[in-house]
Image (spheres, rainbow, N blue to C red):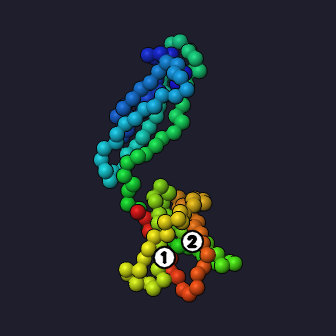
Amino acid sequence: MSSESNADYLKFKVDGAQIAAISGTKGSWTQVSYRVEGAGLSHTLRREYAKNASLASSTDAGWVDDIVWTGDVPEPYLAPNIVSTVATNSHMRFSFVGERGIPYIVQTNATLTPSGWGDLLSVLPEYVSETNGIHRFEVSPGFLGQGQMFYRVIGR
């Protein structure tokens, strides 16, 4: 923050309600924390810089370095869908579409029975790209073993 103290403010709002306002010349950063209530609801987070008409002071600016969400992760709206697979030199790689911000788990099942699914804990999908709001991820389960193996991706 670099502004006229008690006059020019960097304001933070949640769903239109102001939750914090900081002004003046601060050190390298000032942490602002706020608990957003209402599980399962969508929220609008907004930051605004409000400059009054009087004195110009410092840089007359405020910066946001990072926003961290530590709350619950919503249920996926879009079910993950495997769209391509590639197997070369005993390795397998596949792509799937899903929602960014949802933790996905890759599971495998050699027998394709309901109780046969198990998590591949060492395999995490990697975000690759976005097209028209659809996010594409890639994952490499590793070496192809002997026999047939089935894979699926689920959102947690």
Indicate the quadrant where residue 126 lies. Answer: bottom right
Establish if 103 lies above or below 91: above
| Residue position marked by numbered label 2 in the rendering | 141
| Residue position marked by numbered label 1 in the rendering | 108
- Picture residue at 43% right of the left edge, 32% below the top: 32
Marks 1 & 2, CB-CB < 8 Å contact? yes
Q: Is residue 52 visible?
A: no
In the picture provided, is 75 more to the left or to the right than 99?
left
Nearest to the observer: residue 18 or residue 110: 110
Q: Residues within 10 Å of mark 1 (few under 14, many from 20)?
A: some
Q: Is residue 83 visible?
A: yes
In the picture provided, is 61 more to the left or to the right than 21?
right
- Picture residue at 66% right of the left edge, 79% below the top: 90
Q: Position of residue 40 (x, y in %)?
A: 32, 53
- Picture residue at 61% right of the left edge, 75% below the top: 143
In the picture provided, is 15 more to the left or to the right than 85?
left
